Image (tube, rainbow, N blue to C red):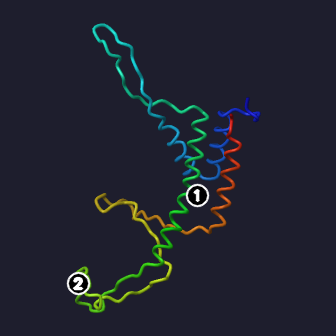
């Protein structure tokens, strides 16, 4: 018997409603993950001349408890894992240097194999992290789609871990 006075269905409904009010895009991502369903194997008993059962795979909807777990996984990825990746990337980029050719004739010709022809700059400095979402092979739309990665303070990540742990306790129906 669950210690809660609400069902997994009501918990999922409340979570999704609150998410839609706070962040429509995140709510849509979670809904898409839930709607994708799970892959299950079905067996059909032998019929007629067939001696072996027919086995096939199909997509089945998640139960409400499973859907809550999927929602928690997406929230963890969004609020904890992605900021950790961005922070790790920022640390790696800060340690990296940018090589600038000393001579204008070498610009644009790639590496020459000679270290003295390249000046290293910006080593130990924070660099912008931007990802181009639309690839070069896609036809350009109204404008470039860029995603700026921002670092997140470790204290905020720890706070999100705490918040997610509290949310997991609310969704424990065992």
Q: Left or right: where does residue 75 sit relative to residue 90?
A: right
Residue at left offset 40%, top offset 64%? 132
Front residue (pair 54, 68):
54
Viewport quadrant of the N terminus: top right
State the residue position of label 2: 112
User: Which class describes the residues within 10 Å of circle 1: few (<14), some (14-19), or many (20+)?
Assistant: many
Secondary element type, mark 2: loop
Q: Quadrant of residue 96?
A: bottom left
Q: Position of residue 155 (x, y in %)?
A: 66, 66
**Camera-side residue: 173 or 138?**
173
Q: Is residue 22 above or below residue 150?
A: above
C-alpha span from label 1 to label 2: 42 Å
Question: How crowded is the residue under tag 2: few (<14 C-alpha within 10 Å), some, or many (20+)?
Answer: few
Identify the disc placed on residue 44: none
Is 77 on the left-hand or right-hand side of 140?
right
Q: Is residue 23 above or below residue 155?
A: above
Indicate which disc residue 80 carries: 1
Residue at the spot x=73%, y=34% of the render? 6
Residue at point 40% right, 20% down? 43
Q: Is residue 4 left or right of residue 76?
A: right
| Element type at mark 1 | helix
| Residue at the outermost front position | 51
Lower sequence index among marks 1 and 2:
1
CB-based contact (under 8 Å), mark 1 and mark 2: no
Work out whether 121 lies above or below 46: below
Which x, y percent locates residue 25? 54, 51
């Amino acid at each position: 018997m669950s210690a809660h006075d609400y069902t997994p269905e009501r918990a999922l409904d409340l979570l999704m409603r609150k998410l839609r009010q706070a962040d429509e895009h995140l709510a849509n991502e979670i809904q898409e993950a839930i709607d994708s369903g799970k892959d299950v194997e079905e067996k059909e008993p032998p019929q007629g001349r067939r001696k072996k059962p027919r086995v096939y795979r199909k997509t089945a909807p998640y139960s409400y408890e499973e859907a809550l777990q999927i929602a928690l996984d997406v929230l963890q990825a969004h609020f904890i894992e992605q900021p950790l990746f961005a922070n790790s990337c920022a640390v790696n980029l800060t340690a990296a240097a940018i090589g600038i050719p000393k001579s204008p004739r070498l610009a644009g010709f790639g590496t020459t194999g000679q270290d003295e022809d390249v000046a290293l700059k910006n080593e130990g400095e924070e660099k912008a992290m931007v990802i181009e979402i639309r690839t070069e092979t896609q036809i350009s739309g109204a404008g470039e789609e860029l995603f700026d990665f921002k670092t997140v303070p470790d204290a905020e990540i720890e706070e999100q871990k705490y918040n997610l742990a509290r949310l997991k306790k609310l969704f424990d129906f065992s």
